[in-house]
Each structure stands twice: as structure tokens, then as C-alpha cells.
Image (cartoon, rainbow, N blue to C red):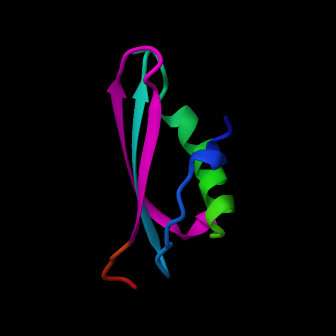
Amino acid sequence: MQVRNKLQKISIPEGYLSIKYKVGFSSNGSDLDNCIKPFQDIISKYYGFNDNRIYHFDVEKEIVKKGNEYISFEILPYKNLLQ
């Protein structure tokens, strides 16, 4: 099944964004950063925002059993004193 078919409808905050990712891999050898950019491109297109609005992201890797791999995310407004 395609990733976009699993995405739920959410509201995207205005302005700068921060995204929290959590990725479950079944292999210790999986590189965390390899999945972020393609996934970020998918969600930005699906939710209709330019990913140049992302000013911060937090990424966490978890090792899971084979067949339980996942990626979860939360999109939040990015609060910065410079805004």
C-alpha cells in the first residue's frame, strides 16, 4: 500500500514548522536519515505545504521486529524568537 493511502487528514499550522519523526526499523544497520527526505516530500505534497517552511525537526530511531516497521510524525508550529 502506498504511504499516502495511510495518511490521515490533519491541519497544518501556518508559518514556520517543526516536525517530530519516529522511525521503527527492523535492522540496526538502517540509516535513519535515508527515509526522512523522501517521506518529508510525500507529506508536504499530500498536505499541500512547501517543505522549506520546516525550520526544525527531531528524529528518533527505534528497533522493532521484522514486519512491524513504521514511521510516525507530528507537525507543529515552530516557535522562535526571531519570527
Q: Residue 66 appears at what percent x and percent y? A: 44, 14
| 14 is within the stretch colored magenta | no
- Residue pictured at 69% horizontal, 60% vertical: 45
Considering the image in quadrants, where does the C terminus appear?
Answer: bottom left
Magenta-highlighted residues: 50-77
**Is residue 52 or residue 63 the one in the foreground?**
63
Q: Residue 60 appears at what percent x and percent y? A: 34, 39
Q: How many labels does the image show?
A: 0
Considering the image in quadrants, where does the N terminus appear?
Answer: top right
Q: Residue 38 appears at what percent x and percent y? A: 64, 43
17 with respect to 3 (left or right): left
Secondary structure that dominates the magenta span: strand
| 71 is within the stretch colored magenta | yes
Q: Establish if 80 lies above or below 27.
A: below
Q: Residue 6 appears at what percent x and percent y? A: 58, 46
- Residue pictured at 46% horizontal, 77% vertical: 13
Q: Establish if 26 lies above or below 35.
A: above
- Residue pictured at 53% horizontal, 57% vertical: 8
- Residue pictured at 36% horizontal, 21% vertical: 64
Q: Establish if 54 lies above or below 15.
A: above
Q: Residue furthest bottom?
A: 83
Q: Establish if 25 lies above or below 42.
A: above
